[in-house]
Image (cartoon, helix red, strand yellow):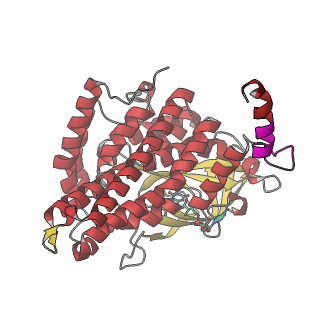
Amino acid sequence: MVWDFSTEPEFQEQLDWMDEFVREEIEPLDLVFKGPGDPFDPQSPAQAAMAPLKKIVKERGLWACHLGPDLGGQGYGQVKLALMNEILGRSRFAPSVFGTQAPDTGNAEILARFGTEEQKQKYLQPLLDGDIASCFSMTEPQAGADPGEFQCSARLEGDEWVINGEKWFSSHASLAEFLIVMVVTNPDVNIHEGASMLLVEKGTPGMEILRDSAVGPQPEIGTGVHGYIRFDNCRVPKENMLGGEGKGFEVAQSRLGGGRVHHAMRTISVLKRSLDMMCERALSRRTKGQQLSDMQMTREKIADVYTKIVQFRLHVLYTAWLMDRDKGYSRAVRREISAIKAAMPKVLNDVVYTALHLHGSLGMSNETPLIHFWQIVPEMGIVDGPTEVHKLAVAKSVLREYSPSDDLFPTYHVPKKLEAARKKLAKYL
Ligand SMILES: Cc1cc2nc3c(=O)[nH]c(=O)nc-3n(C[C@H](O)[C@H](O)[C@H](O)COP(=O)(O)OP(=O)(O)OC[C@H]3O[C@@H](n4cnc5c(N)ncnc54)[C@H](O)[C@@H]3O)c2cc1C
């Protein structure tokens, strides 16, 4: 059995190159282009600055590495992708420059697996090339975590699906050439059998984006990238159904799992940056006649933060390894994905808060990235499903492996075990 934590030297070279490229060439974009849609919006002025960088990434063979070779990626697998995402998570622009930005990654996978030839021609290639944006639209104003409450529906009329209802927080809806929308097609069965996915093209009559919501305290209402959408007798052709009637969750699962893991991989870089900043600050700041780094309480903080990061990182890498081993979303994989998803806001909270706190007023200011990291903490507890729901999934999966004691006392009840041990070892006693 192999239990190996090393990285091949050739791949480490790629990672080293990426690390420098992200720091030197991509991070400056984060400082200059502040619009919420800049990394994703094909019309943003940032695109001109990103174009030569994307070219370099493509020439180096590192474009869209989440994809298999059939779709123009490297087929590196999840462990290598994890190591890459740990670097890309440093910058808001880096995933787009490397062709691995959400939600386009998952949407491309859906199109590749479930789209018709015509849909693939029209949308898949431009999406893979990074020329257009897309949207995945599932959450509704009255329901997110519990899809059983979804109401947005579609009924078949002749050769068309007619969609009615609302969607909420659909990221990049205003920028997208197409949306993948979850609709209830059979309200009489459990939602997991009654939901389907429809591809809706930009500008389809009957689809209206009521406004865009922003994450965080943006001063203007309507300035974000998360669309509030209304469908009013919006008609799409019958063949726009992806994956078949009632297969909505099967289709969604193929992307949501990946999305959650990629968030966790990128989170590692936020954690590492926080630790880097903490350590530098502790070594740079003097108080009460000594370095902050010499004070025991600071040292305890650094040790705790370091340990939490290593634990989380190993859990993410283990999940990635399981995905490579099981070639997809086995039960074991789904459990670990939920576990790291649930762990993410807590580890972010502990690490980012400690780093921010150690920076004092500077940490609270808009002059370091720490206050932006702080905003990610609650976001990661909500996006792709709240923590509670993932904890419930983990517990359900763990409990499945156990059964109740067949006795009044636990299976390992000392009196019972002692009696058996005494019998077994009687000749020595
Ligand atoms: C930045 C961001 C981007 C997003 N992008 C998209 C997107 O592109 N497309 C899309 O469709 N959606 C998107 N979402 C929406 C996201 O998927 C939902 O916010 C999420 O599923 C939770 O749904 P909700 O907001 O309706 O919260 P609710 O379902 O109302 O949950 C709110 C709270 O209720 C509690 N709760 C809920 N269920 C349970 C339970 N079973 N047990 C115990 N407590 C519970 C939890 O405390 C939870 O945080 C995005 C969200 C964010 C923050």
Q: Which quadrant of the frame does ligand 1 lie within?
A: bottom right
Q: Quadrant of the C terminus?
A: top right
Q: Residue 202 at x, y = what percent?
A: 48, 55
Q: Residue 314 at x, y = what percent?
A: 43, 41
Prevalent SS, magenta region: loop
Q: Residue 148 at x, y = what percent?
A: 72, 59
Q: Residue 289 at x, y = what percent?
A: 12, 72
Quick one: 296 or 134, which is closer to the camera? 296
For residue 95, side relative to residue 54 (left or right):
right
Q: Give the range drawn in magenta.
A: 403-419
Quick one: 267 or 186, which is closer to the camera? 267
Image height check: is 248 above or below 275? Answer: above
Quick one: 11 or 350, which is closer to the camera? 350
Based on the displayed image, in which of its 4 quarters is residue 98 positioned?
top left
Q: Residue at x 54, y 57 (%)?
A: 204
Instruction: In the displayed orientation, state which residue is furthest to the front.
Output: 429
Q: Residue at x 67, y 51 (%)?
A: 395
